[in-house]
Image (cartoon, rainbow, N blue to C red):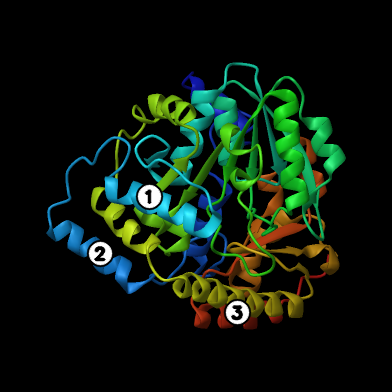
Amino acid sequence: MTVPGSWQRLARGAGLLDARGEPMLTIFAEMSALAASTGAINLGQGFPDEDGPQAVLDAARRAIADGHNQYPPGIGVPVLREAITTHQEHWYGIRLDPDTQVLVTAGATEAIAATLLALTEADDEIVVVEPYYDEYAAIAALANTRLVTVPAHAPDFLPDLEDLAAAVTDRTRIILINSPHNPTGAVLPRETLERIVELAHEHNAIIVTDEVYEHLVYDGQHVPIASLPGAFERTLTISSGGKTFSATGWKVGWISGPAELIRAVLAVKQFLTYVNAGPFQHAIAVGLGLPDEVFDEAAASLARKRDLLMGGLSDAGFEVYRPSAGYFVIADAAELGVRDAAALARTLPELVGVVGVPVSALASQERQADYASLMRFAFCKRVDVLERAAAQLSGLKLPAS
């Protein structure tokens, strides 16, 4: 028996309903299970396999020992909110009030969900660049809104400005951008960001920006859209400590922006998790105050790992697109004569002992064919793991069709 409910709308929006109307696993859960069952190296899901800065780990232990184990304040512990405001001003020149313009969340995932649910009504439109983080489509559907997508294609994976302008209309409630971008690693240039601000003003839209990879930029520069003229008053910025400090399991994220928008999101967020991660909030506050060199070295280390994995994928025969940021590299299997990357993803563990995910799973149904030959591989792993993966990939031999 199929259980009726709003979960069906969410699952349908995320492409996770089968032909019988039954829920399916996400592509990440499916590929991780495949890695576990075959013993393959899991480059499908974006989590590091080594810890971040020792100072951050030590701060978490101290916070637990010091008794920070009960409910924190609903908007987050003061020391973290103050650290976020200091961080935004130090890195980007954005000044915030820690008491009214910052909200701590259960990772960026809750921040996105609470924001979309709080700020939209049924039949509003949310504009996103695709491929996209799969949560966007799921929550847009749960909120009973319409997701309007703007395609980004190889080699740079940047949206066309004319396509962007055509997508944003007076029905647009939110322009949801993700820069640095998951899954492609693209970093939106200032010209694109400025055009988004113009469109938001023209159509009275709110900008929501997902910047969880803000410190993991290897080529170019990340410019927060909230730092541009005319942007702050209509922008909510979302980020997280998980990616920056290799602590994805702690689920400490935050939203910053105008007080009236923060209050609206809090009205919803307080009935999702209410609060979370009390001691880890203290630890992330310590992390945000670390010297600039710590952030720079983390990015440099990942850049070296990116290049290592790119070499293995190239040796295997994929066309490889160099990401400017983030955890992932996109590889095109069309160079191997493969048009169905989803099918390849399910056979690759047996062929070479490596797991990736098809990019088509991160695209709207209407545009899945545009990304059908692309795969995403994570390079946020130990060097020895990536060396083994690169060696195994370089030995790829596809069976004769």
Measuring 56% from the left and 50% from the top, which residue is drawn there? 211
Reading the chain from its start, which is encountered first: label 1 or label 3? 1
The residue under label 2 is: 59
Amino acid at pointer 3: Arg
Vertical order, 21 against 34 (above or below) = above
Q: Give me the C-alpha separation between circle 1 and circle 3.
A: 27 Å
Q: Position of residue 220 (x, y in %)?
A: 69, 66
Where disc 3 sits, the SS reads helix
Looking at the picture, tell me which residue is in the foreground, 320 or 95. Answer: 95
Measuring 56% from the left and 64% from the top, which residue is drawn there? 216
Judge from the rendering whether residue 232 lies leftward or rightward of residue 334; answer left or right. Answer: left
Where disc 1 sits, the SS reads loop
Looking at the picture, tell me which residue is in the foreground, 162 or 40. Answer: 162
The residue under label 3 is: 304
Amino acid at pointer 1: Val
Q: Quadrant of residue 137?
A: top right
The residue under label 1 is: 252
Looking at the picture, tell me which residue is in the foreground, 307 or 159. Answer: 159
Crowding around mark 3 (Cα neighbors within 10 Å: few <14, some 14 to 19, many 20+) is: some
